[in-house]
Image (spheres, helix red, strand yellow):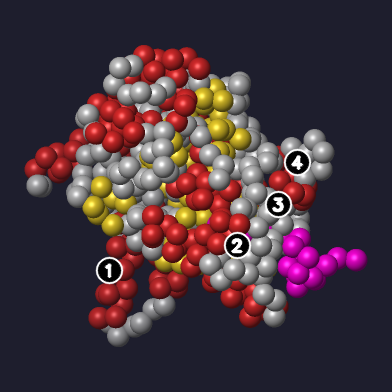
Amino acid sequence: MELTAKQGIEQGRTALGIEFGSTRIKAVLVDSNNKPVASGAHDWENRHLGNIWSYSLDDIREGLQGSFAAMAKDVKEKYGVTLTTVGAIGISAMMHGYMVFDQKGEILVPFRTWRNNTAARAGEALTELFGYHIPARWSVAHLYQAISDGEPHVKDIVFQTTLEGYVHWMLTGKKVIGIGEASGMFPVDPATKQYDARMLKQFNELIAGKVPFKVEEILPEILLAGEDAGKLTPEGAKFLDPSGNLKAGIPLCPPEGDAGTGMVATNSIKKRTGNVSAGTSVFAMIVLEKELSKAYPEIDLVTTPVGDLVGMVHCNNCTSDLNAWVGMFGEFAKELGVDIPKWKLYDMLYFASEKGDKDCGGLLAYNYVSNEHVTNVEHGRPMFVRKADSNFNLANFMRAHLYSAFGALKVGCDIMLKEEGVKLDRITGHGGLFKTERVGQSYLAAAIGAPVTVMKTAGEGGAWGMAILANYLITKKKGESLEDYLDGRVFAGQEGVTVAPDPADVAGFEKFTERYVEGLPIVREAVRSLK
């Protein structure tokens, strides 16, 4: 006989996932079948300290406690239960960045988030040294930049971690990290599932005499999904729940980055599968069958939570410019005395785009509200361009802006799919761009030449993915892989809609992309001319 949600909560047959996003911290409690039974959230904002984007340790602690308290309140209101225990806990956060601590466990400099581009020179130098792309947001780039700049704190570093690694340490006392997040701290060898030995040696030779440590001495221990990552200590229980209701002793799974939890939440950890998250920014993650032939600045190499290699294309711009145009059409409607609900306005304009020419009638749009490293554009200059004889109408206008939302992403993905011959069986799409039925989904399918699935559960997000990883720790059968667990015990029977690429749309997107790449000098000139 299956337990009710209330019985499951009372017996601790649950799992809790908490994810620190850039503007919201979300806590999701799931039952033994990975169905959400309660949730809570806490809004927060990063602050600009000098030239650094950061969150304080107080922000982190208060945000953690706030999200947990909101979830516990939801449990109380729904089920009349005071939450005293859960089956397992998992902590996730936005990836990478720089948190370093001294011998006493004191933070040495304010947390430098992924948003900071201050380590770009170090990333370029390490890319050249390793022959392996090191983005500026990766932890090792931040470390080498601090060493290169002679920052006085580096001599005192005894531990370096990421945001979720820090929170996990506070809860358990364990200095560990999930392999997916580890791969964005320092390159990981998919064969050994550890930090890459050749690159460790090269880095240590590079910093010899400048710091009193070897890099592997300060990095957290790597763990795979399903491995024991410690238990909630009495101090950790108080750190998470100052009310004192939550008991110590709860097991924790390895902490993971938001890219890893996104893969889990979309069932995209198998080789030849991937996911695309399309909102303010857009990124694609494709699980590779083998290593790429060389390093590409457009592609980050990370891993799944079980250590398989992933090619990641991350673009800063996706829906912001599109949203601005939709907003302007809404203003025009109000001038006519028509107040159209936002969701309906999006649907009307997105559906109108389907009547357009497959290549957008010669129209061209660039959605660069901020810089875009994939296409080498240094500052945001959103643009709409057409020739005098282009087929300028509403359908083509909207289609061009929707294509543009995937424009830079396609440039990066084409390197993997065309130049490297990476095979892709399916992609799962999630994020705001896919809220309107079919439209963004079919255009993404055309861009990548593979079927795109959108699932209802994808809206649960990374906190749900983290809760699944916590549940996997305590409910997996002996020898059951995460891949099998997701297929058989999480996503079996899940509702989803799959759209295959339409050959005419594929040909039209290819034509648009040729025009898009040829026109990039226009945007770069706008950056130069419009100060």
User: Which numbered tag is attached to residue 28?
Assistant: 2
Q: Residue furthest right?
A: 1
Amino acid at the residue labelled 1:
Met
Amino acid at the residue labelled 4:
Asp
Picture coordinates of residue 420, whole percent (x, y): 49, 22
Q: Residues within 10 Å of mark 4 (few under 14, many from 20)?
A: few
> Which-is-in-front pick, marks 4 and 1?
4
Amino acid at the residue labelled 2:
Val
Q: Residue at x 41, y 37 (%)?
A: 103
Amino acid at the residue labelled 3:
Asn
> Which-is-in-front pick, marks 2 and 1?
2
- The part of the image, by quadrant, that contains residue 62 is bottom left
In the image, is 397 to the left or to the right of 79?
left
Distance between mark 4 and mark 2 Cα atoms = 23 Å
User: Which numbered tag is attached to residue 328?
Assistant: 1
- SS class of the residue under badge 2? strand
Picture coordinates of residue 272, whole percent (x, y): 61, 33
Q: Quadrant of the N terminus?
A: bottom right
Q: Is residue 441 above or below residue 437?
A: above
Are circles 3 and 4 on residues that touch, CB within 8 Å? Answer: no
> Which-is-in-front pick, marks 3 and 4?
3
Q: Is residue 84 above or below residue 257?
A: below
Magenta region: 1-18
Q: Residue furthest front?
A: 104
Distance between mark 3 and mark 4 Cα atoms = 14 Å
Q: Which residue is mark 3?
A: 471
Q: Residue at x 22, y 39 (%)?
A: 378
In the image, is 261 to the left or to the right of 142?
right
Q: Which residue is mark 4?
A: 484
Towards the viewer: 84 or 156: 156
